[in-house]
Amino acid sequence: MTATRTEPAAQADAWEELRTTALLGTDRRPLPAPAGSPALVAAATAVDRTDPATALLELAALTAVRRRAGARPAAGPSGGAAAAPADPRPELPVAAARRLTVLLEGRSGSAGGTLANLTELLPQWLATARARGLRPPAALVPALLDSARARSELRGDVVALAGPLGRWLAERNPDWRFVLRTATDAPGTGDSGTAGETGSPGAPDAAGDPAAPGDEHRIWHEGLFAERVTHLTRLRRTDPAAGLDLLRGTWTTERAEDRLLFLDALQDGLSPADEPFLEAALGDRSKNVRATAAELLSTLPGSALATRMAERARAAVRLAGTGRALLVTPPAECDAAMQRDGVAPRSPTGRGERAWWFGEIVAATPLRTWTDDTGLTPARLLGLPVGDAGPDGKGAGQADGTWTDDLREGWARAAVRQHDADWARALLGPTPRPGRDGRTARTAGAPAKLLAVLPASERAAWTAAFIQAHGLGEAFQLLGACATPWTPPLSTAVVAALERAARSGTYPWSHSGVLGMTERALAPEAAPAVEALASDAAPDTAWAETFARLAGTLRFRAAMLAELDV
């Protein structure tokens, strides 16, 4: 509700006096003298000023009460406000609406801490309700928007669920302006194992509430930066060429930091049609813009940059004459052409410069270069020994393993960047097994990132096998790469690993990260197995409490999800 205030200038001055005193400190600026209405002067005079800091807070409280008490309702617009657009989606079932209220309030409904923190279950409820194409009761939409205001990770799902009513409210409440800056997708799209505000190209938002026609140029030229990024992202999903034209029209007038994020938005709908613009961006004044343009071009296997990188890679790595080893001659310098293509002349990681240049070239080279040139599969290439070609380029006898890690790390980065599942499988290899010294063999690259390239079912199967072999100690990031809820085999592997951990004498807090994830991601069907572990655990122990809490949470989630099945 808008309002007018009595004596607005005087009130503003009094509040500004107090604010300035608070900023400077009461030791540098005295407390303001009582002023205003007789009642306010009397109340301010009665404040004990022995402790100036305490007195300042009391005076601020008095002034705040006066400002609020003096508010008068302003005259509404003639004819009344336009009603919110209709939302054709079916409303939540009554039981699901009650559950949402419980989740928003963060209360478990049971004593003794027998459930997980329910605010951590809210994202799963939101994603499921969104996928079902349901809408919340109008009375709950403000609370939903407040939750998303406080937790940015919820915004994609909340804005989609709130639908046209949420946008209508956001236009009237500046606290919810983020709604107008949040891009959403159609329900049920994307990987259920990931959360975010972006998804498949070309999808309208879940409420069927696309941006109003004719707003493109106004939003782009007059909107806040976040609104402009959102608008460009949406446009790239529906019409990539129009999005590129819009960005091209203002590119030279944008700030460097803005150009960087606008360029990043081109990932949606990226195609060879974007290459000329990205190639020109390689000459940008900002090194971060140049690096981002180079990375985007490297994901286009047919781009001129990818071709240049492939030529550099061929010069740096060759198959030995016998075909039984790879010999490496890393770049001797980072020339101007390499720098233009996104290779920094100095390593930001502390690695040797030649190793850094070599890794950057391999990571930006199309992976098919290696298989096409050698006729070998990724697995065969990874099995070849690697060595330094030496001054004569022929290598010194047997490959000694020099450059092996650098080459594999570059291949791993390329597999993630190019979303190449065949190379990701080869780099991950079969489920790692402990070596003779009991340690797990090292996988090139970040295994969780390589897993993310694979289909959801394959991710879950690989992670389940890893946990069966090695337990939960190094499984946190791998589990985070798996779609939720976890598949039954993965859930079974996790429960079995928790049982082994309990029997080994370790404490639950040694696995706190995995346990927190388990409460949100373990298949609810695993509840009986977890309840059996709770019964078998010694009474009044940390593991008994942990298993009881996990079982209660699984039952809660099962009921929560069942209520959304309509």
Image (tube, rainbow, N blue to C red):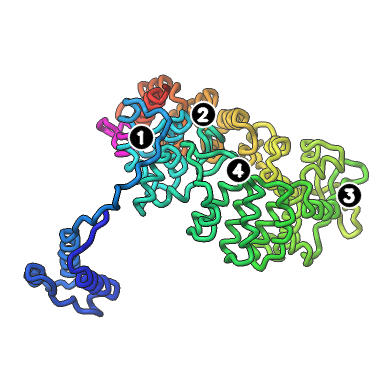
Of discs 4 and 2, which sits in the foreground? 4
- Label 1, secondary structure: give it: loop
Q: Marks 3 and 4: CB-CB under 8 Å? A: no
Of discs 4 and 1, which sits in the foreground? 4
Side of 465 relative to 119 (left or right)? right
Lower sequence index among marks 1 and 3:
1
Label annotation for residue 116 = 1
Q: Is residue 401 magenta?
A: no
Rounded to the nearest whole Å, what is the CA distance between mark 1 and mark 2? 18 Å
- Label 2, secondary structure: give it: loop
Rounded to the nearest whole Å, what is the CA distance between mark 3 and mark 2? 49 Å
* Disc 3 target residue: 397
- Label 3, secondary structure: give it: loop
Residue range highlighted in magenta: 101-115
Of discs 3 and 4, which sits in the foreground? 4
Q: Which amino acid does label 4 sit on?
A: Thr
Rounded to the nearest whole Å, what is the CA distance between mark 4 and mark 2? 32 Å
Dividing the picture into quadrants, the one containing residue 75 is bottom left
Residue 510, visible in the rendered structure: no
- Label 4, secondary structure: give it: helix
Residue at the spot 13% in from the left edge and 74% down from the top edge: 35
Residue at the spot 54% in from the left edge and 27% down from the top edge: 490
